[in-house]
Image (tube, grey):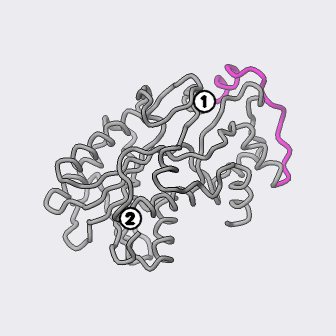
């Protein structure tokens, strides 16, 4: 990406902070918006649900929007409020981080960007609303837009280590459906490329090539931190009954194909298999 054009990061969370660090390493100026204040003077505390969204003193030419929708709303009023604040100074390039959950249940099929959108959960429906709002506004402004659909995000500090050490119960490998995930640092690397003036536009899936199940992923982590997990649960429905919070994720089965972004960027994730990503995350990489 250009080393002179600043970036505005909306949502300085797990990925947002890593993106900010990467921009600093490249010598690129950035401003971040987040709900709670922090020590970095480049990070501004703004409650997008309540505070006036004042962007007059912020360079808005390149925007990466990483903030999630509010969990108790229909659609994403938070994003729509932010977009209204951009009406007088629309960006040149706008990237929105969405979720592969918008595809819903595809019965284990391989899913690329042409797959039907079968969002069934409130969480996924909010993301679809956000995607629509971004595309409508960007096309009206003449702004280059990117929708980056992400699966489960992992990396340093995001391996469920505490749960694994506490005796995490898992479905048996033979019944656990395939998973989709991407390492935090590969998200950052893709975003940096997509922010370039000549970067591709449109909708992109971003996932590793492995589709390791959640059971195999947790077992790989457990092995590397020296933890023995309890016996697995053979009946998947019994697992869902015991852990209903996991059911909404695991019942929606799909294998995310990210060929399009790989070809568009002439690039592939550094951690294209989960084992290499796990080992790097545990070593602090």
Q: Can residue 165 be seen in this view?
A: no
Residue at image coords 52%, 65%: 18
Q: Position of residue 150 (x, y in %)?
A: 49, 45
Give the vertical position of 240 relative to 37 (above or below): above
> Which residue is disc 2 drawn over?
196
239 or 50, which lies in front? 239
Q: Is residue 174 left or right of residue 51?
A: right
Residue at image coords 39%, 76%: 3
Q: Is residue 277 magenta?
A: no
Give the vertical position of 155 relative to 77 (above or below): below
Q: What stretch is highlighted in magenta?
A: 225-244
Q: Is residue 147 left or right of residue 262?
A: left
Residue at image coords 85%, 53%: 226
Which one is earlier in the sequence, the residue at label 1 or at label 2? 2
Give the vertical position of 157 relative to 136 (above or below): below
> Which residue is disc 1 drawn over?
250
Q: Residue 52's quadrant in the figure? A: bottom left
63 or 163, which lies in front? 63
Give the vertical position of 205 relative to 4 (above or below): above
Q: Where is residue 88 in the image (x, y as percent from the top left)?
A: 13, 61
Q: In which quarter of the image is the C terminus?
A: bottom right
253 or 166, which lies in front? 253
163 or 183, which lies in front? 183
Of tags 1 and 2, the one toward the viewer is: 2
Q: Position of residue 177 (x, y in %)?
A: 66, 29
Element at badge 2?
loop
């Amino acid at each position: 990406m250009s080393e002179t054009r600043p970036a505005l990061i909306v949502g300085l969370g797990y990925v947002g902070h890593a993106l900010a660090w990467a921009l600093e390493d490249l010598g690129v100026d950035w401003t971040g918006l987040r709900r709670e204040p922090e020590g970095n003077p480049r990070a501004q505390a703004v409650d997008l649900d309540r505070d006036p969204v004042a962007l007059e003193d912020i360079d808005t030419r390149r925007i990466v929007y990483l903030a999630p929708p509010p969990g108790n709303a229909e659609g994403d009023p938070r994003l729509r409020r932010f977009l209204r604040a951009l009406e007088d100074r629309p960006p040149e390039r706008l990237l929105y981080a969405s979720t592969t959950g918008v595809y819903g249940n595809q019965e284990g099929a391989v899913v690329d960007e042409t797959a039907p959108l079968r969002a069934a959960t409130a969480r996924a429906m909010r993301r679809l609303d956000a995607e629509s709002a971004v595309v409508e506004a960007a096309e009206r402004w003449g702004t280059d837009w990117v929708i980056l659909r992400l699966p489960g995000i992992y990396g340093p500090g995001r391996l469920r280590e505490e749960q694994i050490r506490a005796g995490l119960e898992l479905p048996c490998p033979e019944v656990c459906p395939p998973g989709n995930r991407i390492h935090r640092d590969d998200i950052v690397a893709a975003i940096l490329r997509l922010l370039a003036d000549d970067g591709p536009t449109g909708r992109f899936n971003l996932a590793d090539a492995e589709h390791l199940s959640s059971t195999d992923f947790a077992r790989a982590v457990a092995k590397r931190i020296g933890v023995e997990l309890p016996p697995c649960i053979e009946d998947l429905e019994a697992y869902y009954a015991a852990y209903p919070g996991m059911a909404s994720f695991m019942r929606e089965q799909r294998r995310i194909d990210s060929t399009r972004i790989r070809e568009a960027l002439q690039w592939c994730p550094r951690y294209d298999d989960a084992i290499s990503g796990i080992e790097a995350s545990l070593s602090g990489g």
